[in-house]
Image (cartoon, coloured by chain):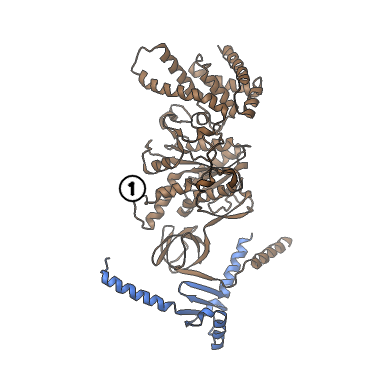
Amino acid sequence: MKLLDNYIKQIEKEIDSSSSQGETRETGKLLELKDGVAIVEGLYNGFFGEIVEFDNGVEGFIIDLSEDTAGVVIFGDYLSLKAGSTVKGTGKILAIDVGEDLIGKVVNPLSKSLDSKETIKYDKLYPIERIAAGVVKRQPVNTPLQTGIKAIDTIIPIGRGQRELIIGDRVTGKSTIAIDTIINQKGKNLICIYCAVGQKNSKVASVIETLNANNAMDHTIVVSASASDPVSLQYIAPYSATAIGEYFMDKGKDVLIVYDDLTKHAWAYRQLSLVLRRPAGREAYPGDVFYLHSRLLERACRLNKENGGGSITALPIVETQEGDISGYIPTNVISITDGQIFLETDLFNSGVRPAINVGLSVSRVGGSAQTKAIKQVSGRLKLDLAQYRELAAFSQFESELEEETKKQLNRGAKITQILIQDRNKPLSLAEEVCIIWAATQGYLDDIPTEKIREFEEKLLDEITTSTGKAIVSKINSSKELDSDTEAKLKKLVSNLTKTKL
Amino acid sequence: MKIKPRLKEELRKYILNKLRNESKNATLISSHKLTKDQIDEIKVKFPRLKNKKINLQTDEELLAGFIIKEGSKVTDLSLKAKLIQFKKTINEIT
């Protein structure tokens, strides 16, 4: 009985608060219904982006205005709509509820809970489309975003506020890199948003499971518009994920958003545009497909102190066909972002995982955000790898090699081995520094290539559990490799190599 | 379909004229037939209807109250709309 009383009380409260006193609303008539898009006659004073309501309660928003009709994208079930039914304007711009409570939840692009565990408490209303922060509000990237992946942190570093594209064919481990990055942010004061666009439901489920298994859901929000959701929801998903991110950014917090993936987002937009009969361009994408992604990724930024100092880091993912990065969407997104991580099928199949092509991957701004410790060891690493690549191609024709060349080839092979890393096992800053230091100082040169992984495990074991603990805590706290610590590390590593031989 | 420019101009003028006339009209849909006094009372509440030609219609499905339609603008003051709103509120709170 008490439950019922509460229920009635709540309804009374709701009705009292809603002022349904005869407001005048803009209306129209449903003229045509296409796949997920309705053409509406009337709504003469409707505006772009306005939310409209169909008579069965389904909502939509205006995406196209012509002289006497309006194109409305429908959220939800459009099969129950009938031609001739009335459409009411609400006078509200498309916005979603956001709040602190979203953390740890799985939501749809309208920020409604999908796992129905509990109702979400919202705090504010944020517009889905917002103009990105201007130049005066920004500052350069200066804080690193540790991915916990050796190859990325050393060679292609990412800073908070950067936009780094992850690009590659299907099954090359694109999502894995993003997921590992999210897992590594545990206790690093960074809120992660994983935005799935047009993904298989099974894949999203396994991502959530992975995050749960690694206790990463405590700082993560999953925004999902799967392949079975209406195209309209897939279209707005990245924008609403960014709106959620902006809520936290405006509170001065750091946010990481993974868009998985933007190719499918472009497909969703292409479908909408073709149904709306907009002129099609290259690969049948509409003319504004560049703006589609540029306005989205521009919203990633690092605000300066006067504006709260928050940041949004964007990790968009783009899928290529057979390694072709000169496709329409890949080139567009490459030119928008501050660098890319390029993954290759050949590398992946030969066991180099993460399958990062170090030659084609760049980070245009992340270098300035690297910690001192990483900078100290990574400079040599890049040089060694570049020389190795050059020589590796050249030495295939040459039977007799100079001693110096052999040395460089050997070093390169060892470094390639050391950059291999298991999935879902991100490393801490100190662990990365110690291993890379050992590799670039030449301690691994005498170890056979197939034993490198074994040595790495031993070294990690040594520095995390026994004698090396002091080194790890020193590097993790001071974020640099001073001469004292380096000497200690030197002793430890050379002892380890001796016992091995 | 291509329309001759001259014809198009004429058509545009015709439609604009028609639209202008439409803005002078308003439709009043009520559940029951309204008396003259009742209409005058509504006009007092909605002064913008004063200079408009009012088109009267009845629709029993509204149960009570009335709806004013001016072009694409609709003011819904019917009991039916209130009940639908009520139904929605109940469904939302669970």
| Residue A80 visible in this rendered orientation of the protein | yes
Q: A258 above or below A147?
A: below
Which residue occupies the extreme bottom position in the image?
Answer: B36
Decide which of A303, A183 is in the foreground and name it.
A303
The percent position of residue B47, horizontal first and vertical second, equals 54, 80
Residue at 39%, 51% in the rendered image: A288
Q: In this view, does A67 lie to the left or right of B27?
A: left
Quadrant showing the C terminus of chain A: top right
The percent position of residue A287, horizontal first and vertical second, equals 37, 51
**Quarter of the image where one finds residue A95:** bottom right
> What amino acid is found at the position of numbered circle 1 in the picture?
Arg
Chain letter, colour brown: A
Decide which of A71, A304 is in the foreground and name it.
A304
Residue at 43%, 42% in the rendered image: A336
Q: Which chain is mark 1 on?
A: A
Q: A467 above or below A182?
A: above
Residue at 35%, 50% in the rendered image: A284
| Residue B59 visible in this rendered orientation of the protein | no
Instruction: Tell me if mark 1 has few (under 14), some (14-19) or many (20+) residues whose alpha carbon lies within 10 angstroms of its own.
Output: few
The percent position of residue A55, horizontal first and vertical second, equals 51, 67
Which residue occupies the extreme right position in the image?
Answer: A2
**For mark 1, what is the residue?**
A282
Decide which of A33, A244 is in the foreground and name it.
A244
Q: A228 above or below A209?
A: below
Chain letter, colour blue: B
